[in-house]
Image (tube, rainbow, N blue to C red):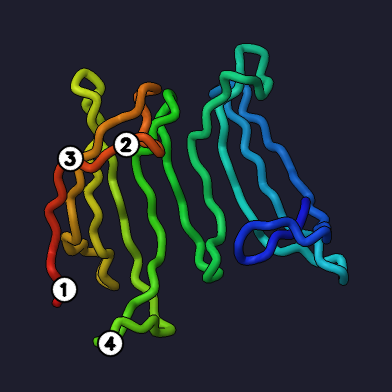
Amino acid sequence: LFRSDAEGIPTGEFRKVRSTYSYDEENNKVTLVGNEVLPDGSEKFMYNQTLTTDENGQIGVDSQILEFEGVDDYGKHFTQTFNQEGDILESISYQPIRNADGDLTDDFEMIRTTYSYDKVNGQATLTSNKVLESGAEEFLYEQVMTLGADQRIGEDSVTISFRGIDEN
């Protein structure tokens, strides 16, 4: 794979990635695990994704991502869960905490966002909660968005309503 700088521009350097595939033929799924192979031969986790397979157990153009786990720019793990149609249902990520002056701290909070869809009216509702150490959740915001022509949340989606907690 090409290495990229902070703006996503390829640097001309490559990194070696080992991908392993585990097939679950009974459930028509495949799990791919990608690890960067470091110069000393050890491996560093990059991603884990589960996809649907076709009736022959192969990855094809109609395969959908069911789950994706990766590492963000801060080195924190995140997960995204999708349904069989490819709609995102849940994401769990870590966001940096800002101090009273608005500057980033070295601390992070876990955020769980759930997605529900009203395809008849072309809308999606996103609900985000902070996950506390106890496992309980604290409401952050709810956002209703339009779906694009492909019935997905995308660049052409527009926020219809937003309700959230003012942290100031």
Q: Residue furthest top?
A: 55
Q: Give the residue type at disc 1.
A: Glu
- Which of the labelled discs sits on residue 167, or is there none? 1
Q: CA distance from mark 3 to mark 4?
A: 30 Å
Residue 125 position, x and y percent, is 22, 39
Q: Give the residue type at disc 3.
A: Ile
Q: Are marks 3 and 1 in contact (CB under 8 Å)?
A: no
Q: Residue furthest right?
A: 40
Residue 72 position, x and y percent, is 53, 62
Q: CA distance from mark 2 to mark 4?
A: 32 Å
Q: Nearer the viewer, residue 61 or 2?
A: 2
Under circle 4, the secondary element is loop
**Among the two numbered marks 2 and 1 on one chain, the one whose residue lies closer to the N terminus:** 2
Q: Are marks 3 and 4 in contact (CB under 8 Å)?
A: no
Q: Give the residue type at disc 2.
A: Ser
Q: Is residue 4 left or right of residue 117?
A: right
**Among the two numbered marks 3 and 1 on one chain, the one whose residue lies closer to the N terminus:** 3
Q: CA distance from mark 3 to mark 1?
A: 22 Å
Residue assigned mark 4: 101
Residue 46 position, x and y percent, is 65, 57
Q: Give the residue type at disc 4.
A: Asp
Q: Are marks 4 and 1 in contact (CB under 8 Å)?
A: no
Residue assigned mark 3: 160
Q: CA distance from mark 2 to mark 1?
A: 26 Å
Q: Nearer the viewer, residue 142 or 65?
A: 142
Location of residue 116 (image quadrant): top left
Q: Are marks 2 and 4 in contact (CB under 8 Å)?
A: no
Residue assigned mark 2: 157
Under circle 3, the secondary element is strand
Q: CA distance from mark 2 to mark 3?
A: 9 Å
